Image: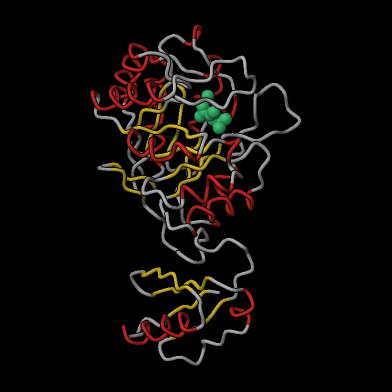
Amino acid sequence: MIIVMKPTATKDNLANVVKKLETLGLRAHLSEGEEVTIVGVIGDKKTIANLEMNMMDGVEKTVRITEKYKMVSRNFHPQNTIIKVGDVEIGGDELVVMAGPCSVESLEQIRETAKAVKDAGAKFLRGGAYKPRTSPYDFQGMGEEGLKIMRQAADENGLKVITEVVDREDIPMFEEYTDVIQVGARNMQNFQMLKALGKSNKPVLLKRGLSATISEWLNAAEYIMSGGNEQVMFCERGIRTFETFTRNTLDLSAIAAIKELSHLPIIADPSHGTGRWQMVQPMARAAVAAGCDGLIIEVHPNPEVALSDGDQSLKPKNFAKLMKDLDAIAKIMGRKI
Ligand code: PEP
Ligand code: MN
């Protein structure tokens, strides 16, 4: 349920509403807008079903919410959420670009990539040090050493770091090295991991599961938010369909769907979304036009010899060209890179 307060409601009116909810064992989630305050009610379903709040002073109306996700819902929080990572804002006017290799492979490789993506205008360095590979015989990542050198390369170039955690036991270590923790597609419904990230103080980028519906994805985000970590952003990275020409089918409509249903930012990943570097540029441009808040793009100085995902990695010069195109499209969308 949400309780919409009157524009004329006083602080005392609001305090009384919150107090009543708390007396019944419910939680109040406040969203204070410029005009009105909305109180999201969280807790036992039966108690909420029997709740009568319309008679209270300052209450304009109550609205029953049928979706299971609450804190993630735009009904609970009508304004867009902006996630601040140092001086970078995700979900605001800025179009935030995160770029780098699929895997961190060496100090030289990550340094060269960091410099190239920074020069082209990226704000984040991406790169995996723990890789969720389909085959156990494929490169599994450099581990903690990879995190260390990625942090170093990012700091040398004034970039933020985003990297994927694959084991919830490792979260404290990731908190030391990274600015945003990525949950990969294969872990979108790893509920123990989501609960653990609910206790983290780092923003989380939640990739869409390989076959996840929008509703499952929103509920996965609710796990993190309801645990206490409200800094969550989505990432559309393509889903499984019957098509085999592309690695996945980038679902651009998910960007519009998430914008309608949630207040949280959404990032697009045209690299995993297509699996083909030739398609990364057009799909990145389309995602910005569709209203995404940022992009995460694989860039490698030498894709032919990349230890993972070389086929979908852009060379630095193509990435720089793409950034110019994105700048123009971002302007039309009222955003800046
Ligand atoms: C990645 O970002 O390199 C990755 C493994 O992505 P996904 O979880 O979307 O497959
Ligand atoms: Mn990859």
Q: Where is residue 174 in the image (x, y as percent from the top left)?
A: 39, 36
Q: Is residue 270 at all visible to an observer of this figure?
A: no
- The C terminus is located in which quarter? top left
- Please tell me how many numbered marks the rendered image carries: 0
- The N terminus is located in which quarter? bottom right
Q: Which colour scheme is used?
A: secondary structure
Q: Is residue 83 at all visible to an observer of this figure?
A: yes
Is 168 on the left-hand or right-hand side of 8? right
Q: Quadrant of ligand 1?
A: top right
The residue depicted at 59 percent of the width and 43 percent of the height is 190
141 in relation to 94, above or below: above
Q: Where is residue 158 in the image (x, y as percent from the top left)?
A: 24, 29
301 in relation to 270, above or below: above
Residue situated furthest right in the rendering: 242
The residue depicted at 59 percent of the width and 15 percent of the height is 138
Looking at the rendering, which quadrant does residue 43 occupy? Answer: bottom right
Q: Where is residue 261 in the image (x, y as percent from the top left)?
A: 55, 57
The residue depicted at 64 percent of the width and 23 percent of the height is 134
Q: Nearer the viewer, residue 188 or 11?
A: 188
Q: Nearer the viewer, residue 337 or 156?
A: 156
The residue depicted at 62 percent of the width and 63 percent of the height is 68
108 in relation to 98, above or below: above
287 in relation to 106, above or below: below
Q: Where is residue 330 in the image (x, y as percent from the top left)?
A: 39, 38
